[in-house]
Image (cartoon, grey):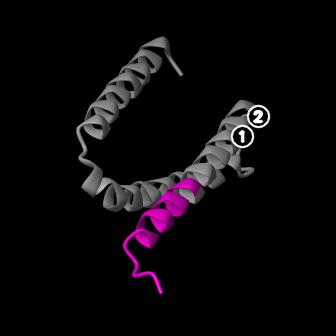
Amino acid sequence: MTTESLIILFYILVLASYLGFELITKVPPTLHTPLMSGSNAISGITMVGAILACNELGYTTFSKWLGMLALVLATINVVGGYTVTDRMLKMFKKKK
């Protein structure tokens, strides 16, 4: 990978991080649960990509470790997202 392509990828990462932060801070609390469900779907896609990166398809050891880290972080995000969504939905159920 050339230095130029690394700079472009780093630029995309910084821009996406900034945009994501700006979007998340502008979300009202009433839309939190639907957006959490959407974020879980995106993390599920990340998990598929991470599994592919961990596979023995000629990737370097560094790529496999990054894939494993992405898999662990995406799994934590999915489990945490569903836990938060479940807790928020329980707030709206009628108590017996």
Name the magenta segment's main secondary structure: helix
What residue sits right under mark 2 in the picture?
61
Is residue 68 depicted above or below 30 in this figure? above
Q: Which range is magenta?
A: 80-96
Label 2 sits on a secondary structure element that is helix
Q: Nearer the viewer, residue 21 or 16?
A: 21
- Left or right: residue 49 versus residue 34 is right
Mark seen at residue 3: none
Residue in the picture at 55% in, 57% down: 78
Residue 55 placed where, x, y %? Answer: 71, 52
At label 2, counting other C-alpha atoms closer than 10 Å, the crowd grade (few under 14, some 14-19, many 20 or more) is few
Quadrant in the picture for residue 32: bottom left
**Is the N terminus in the top left, top right, bottom left or bottom right quadrant?**
top right
How far apart are the alpha carbons under marks 2 and 1?
5 Å
| Whether residue 69 can be seen here | yes
- Left or right: residue 64 versus residue 29 is right
Q: Nearer the viewer, residue 61 or 18?
A: 18
Label 1 sits on a secondary structure element that is helix
Q: Amino acid at mark 2?
A: Thr
Residue in the picture at 26% in, 56% down: 30
Whether residue 24 is in magenta: the answer is no
Is residue 90 depicted above or below 39 in this figure? below
Residue 58 placed where, x, y %? Answer: 71, 43
What residue sits right under mark 1 in the picture?
64
Residue in the picture at 33% in, 35% down: 20
